[in-house]
Amino acid sequence: MKVLYLANGLPHYFNLVLSKLNASPGMEVVVVAPRGPGRHIGDGVFQSRDGIGFRIVELEEYANRLFAGFRGLPRLLLRERPDVIVFPEYLLTGFFLHPGLALARRIVGAKLVQKSIPFLLPDYETARERLRGPLPPPVTAIGRLLKALGLREPMLRGALALRAYCYRRLDAHVNYVDAAREIFGSYGVEPDRICVTRNSPDTDAMRRTEAALQATGDAPVRQPLRLLHVGRLVAEKRVDLLLEAMPLVRARQPQAELVVVGDGPRRTAFEAQAARLGLAGAVRFAGPVYDPLVLGRHFLSASVFVLPGLGGLSINEAMFYGMAIVCSAGDGTEKFLVREGYNGTFFRADDRDSLAEAILRLMADPQELQRMGERSRGIIEREVNIDTVIDAYRKAFSRACA
């Protein structure tokens, strides 16, 4: 089976998944990547070509008022003749509105599979209800003209209907979260076309990293009062909230400390905030870390992983390395991975006091904290790892082609 994967970039973590998928029996993966950094990839996402085990084709991105796409994609389809095309949601309508792309796909007979994390996608009725209420003011000249002509609301309703139609016409949806079944089902997608693959880093590689660290004469030692956060330093990750909670945590656990791994546009602001809060000796910004051994050492040296805002895959990494988790609402994957009182705890989103209390609950009993970390590792070993994810993708593609 040949899979053409349309990517918004080459993030290092998903390159590992695609490389594993390409190496699995009877599977060939060809990745179409943007020429350049990519218009649709998040700020600060680390992209790399190191260790890539699949073929890459670079194409120029474009966007108009109807759809986004890659220049030359119809010709590429006719040349590569894939069995399956996997794409992110922002490319959806192009497969139906671009005549050349729609024709090439039909000639080749490729099946369409959308990959998404629909945690921000409202169900169909909610989306329709929002269009009945007051709409935000238009920000473009065309939007203002449509409003003046009384055409803006009908156009938005038409766009929603088109999106629902496109969802229903796809051969499969692959998603990280269980909520996808209800969300896409509300748009009329048949249940057997909605596949939950979940997401995982390369846990095989992480096992090798863990073994290498444990074999050294300087193996990491777990610190029961050390918190860890790993992620891009952007506003939606809410590291500012975690910093606000730290004085409350240290008021009852004076030895508590925090290590922040990552880089991004908000790093300078977060460092200044830590200084203003008097946390200079309790918070360490380690910067970006991509060396698996160095990153693994950070995970194995802390006991509580804190995700104060949006995020997802870092939870899997922390759980693999045996950490208890504190989080609120991430990208939806946390609803399956983190189990209240079993391997972690939840706090009220955007609530500093709730976050501090959640951290203190876990720190109050070091033995239970250790057991939580062991349960986290068990969930990864049994339920969500690179093997389960690859198997789920293969089943989804087979279902699409059936």
Image (cartoon, rainbow, N blue to C red):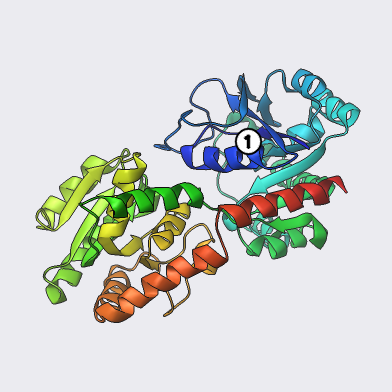
Q: Residue at x 31, y 70 (%)?
A: 355
Tell me where residue 344 sits by quadrant.
Answer: bottom left
Q: Tell me which corner region of the image, top left, top right, bottom left or bottom right, holds residue 107.
A: top right
307 over 84 or under it: above or below: below
For the residue carrying disc 1, how many other residues have a C-alpha within 10 Å: few (<14), some (14-19), or many (20+)?
some
Closest to the observer: 92 or 394?
A: 394
Instruction: Return the residue at label 1.
Output: 143
Q: Kindly state the secondary structure of the residue where label 1 is placed.
A: helix
Query: Residue 252 at x, y = what percent?
Result: 15, 77
Question: Is residue 135 visible in the rendered structure shown here?
Answer: yes
Q: Is residue 127 above or below residue 30?
A: below
Q: Nearer the viewer, residue 53 or 90?
A: 53
Residue 242 spot, x, y in % from top left: 27, 60
Q: Nearer the viewer, residue 218 or 340?
A: 218
Q: Quadrant of the N terminus?
A: top right
- Residue at 38 percent across and 48 percent down: it is 209
Please say if 368 is above or below 6: below
Q: Vertically, is 287 above or below 108?
A: below
- Identity of the amino acid at label 1? Gly
